[in-house]
Amino acid sequence: MRYYSTRNNSDPVTFAAAALTGLAPDGGLYIPEEIPRYRDSVRKNLGAMDFLEIAFETILPYVKDEIPPQVLEDLVTGAFPFGCPLVPFGFNGKPADSVTSGNRASGRSFPLVLELFHGPTAAFKDFGARFMARCFSWLRRGESRPLCILVATSGDTGGAVADGFFGVEGIDVTVLYPKGRVSELQEKQIAGLGDNISALAVEGSFDDCQRLVKSAFADKELKESRSLSSANSINISRLIPQALYYAAAAGRAGAGKTDPGLGATPWRSGGRNGGNVVPGLPLTMTVPSGNFGNLTAGLYAMAMGAPIAGFIAATNINKTVPDYLESGEYKTRPSRATISNAMDVGAPSNFERMAAHWSYTEMKKTIRGFSVTDDETRTTIGDVFNNCGYYLDPHGAVGWTAADKATAAGILTGTTVVLATAHPAKFSETVEPITGPVPVPESIQKAMARTAWAKTIPAELSALKEFLLHD
Ligand SMILES: *Cc1c(COP(=O)(O)O)cnc(C)c1O
């Protein structure tokens, strides 16, 4: 499989080059020359296959020129020791008419929640980051100089990347974050690991951190003495593995089953109701979206042949893509702050990838966009908790609300899956005033028990260089 830049289809590169460089030299994003199809035997059997088998079958065609099958097996086994339960929406014996995106009387099925937060940093970015890390390590085997990855973070991405690369051979990671501007949990996820992960608390803003990273990449002395790389969210090796949970969930739901993979138990007990899933009905995936990497991965899964009928692009008030789907005009704008802050994006980086693969007409056939306000998000968190005893995080709640809106607009038939992208305990400051205390999962308890060790530096390149060259 060859990879092209979204801005130039004449200079193909290998998967290794696309993954290790991240961004194409012309500033475009790498895309595969074609989206492969699942073999028929796989496509028909997704509902019965093990989660790791689906991971293997999903990723292999993209990487097979450079990663042998037995190596890929090891990579996915190491990357995904956790699953993604597909939770039939439970009622705990209560009618859920006021909150569901369907109801019994109309014969519609109820939504399912695909819990993507069972990884070590309790958000879906673990899937991409953990695979990318193992991939980098394999692709660079035999290199004597360690790869030095620089990441600037406003909070969340840094934790997933740090955790993904933690203990991975041949790679050192330095995470830069704005001192005093990340939550205690985020700081511990970034700066509590040690070993090959270093943390720099920068006296400045996130923009300062990003500027430092950019100038480090442009610095001659650093380039000569270190192999530098970034691991940002547009990396193709982070995107591809995200297709696997769409295929797993679609297979399970299509077969009328729930709970894909690895015996991962739903984090919430009780209220389970397998009756939500009606086998054979069209399946719509509702994706809380910011940079649209997650939704793009879903489109890949569908194009590969996973039984998905369509998508709902759920955004907060940063609704560049829903507006585009409505009007056909793509207009980026400055982002506005919301309670679903991992989706505060006004110029979604992966849109360029979507547009390189699919025309406006094609996108419009497959995706419907809905934007959700903070008030609506809070109302949904409260309604779902009061009626069903289930805790949604603000991002998942944006998805739930969008599915509700799609139902009200009469465009949802069949089964709806809402992707829960983060554990509610990660956003307890928003969720708890509405629901009361949120149970804290083991992954977050473990992170909170760590001690953060960060070096504070001024927002100056000389300080970053001093650290990278001499510490
Ligand atoms: C990153 C993130 C999103 C947005 O995902 P994109 O791939 O950028 O669209 C949604 N929810 C959570 C919790 C996230 O961390």
Image: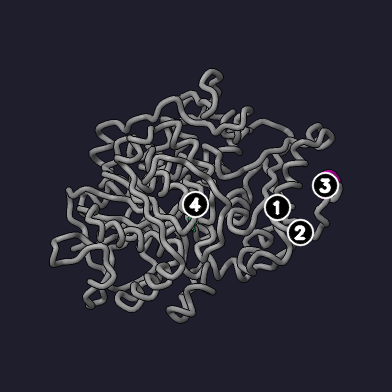
Measured along the vertical axis of the image, is residue 116 above or below residue 244? below
Q: Nearer the viewer, mark 4 or mark 3?
A: 4
- What percent of the width, then of the height, locates residue 309? 26, 44
> What's under tag 2, amino acid-wise?
Gly
| Residue 290, label in figure | 4
Residue behind mark 1: 207
Secondary structure state at the residue bearing disc 4: loop
**On the picture, is 64 further left or further right than 145?**
left
**Mark 1: C-beta under 8 Å from nearest atom of ligand 1:** no
Q: Earlier in the sequence, mark 1 or mark 3?
A: 1
Say if mark 2 contacts mark 1, CB within 8 Å. yes
Residue behind mark 2: 204
In the image, is residue 466 part of the stretch drawn in magenta?
yes
Secondary structure state at the residue bearing disc 1: helix
Measured along the vertical axis of the image, is residue 105 above or below residue 75? below
What separation in Å lies between label 2 and label 1 (alpha carbons)? 8 Å
**Mark 4: C-beta under 8 Å from nearest atom of ligand 1:** yes
Q: Earlier in the sequence, mark 1 or mark 4?
A: 1
What separation in Å lies between label 1 and label 3 (alpha carbons)? 13 Å
**On the picture, is 396 further left or further right than 6?**
left
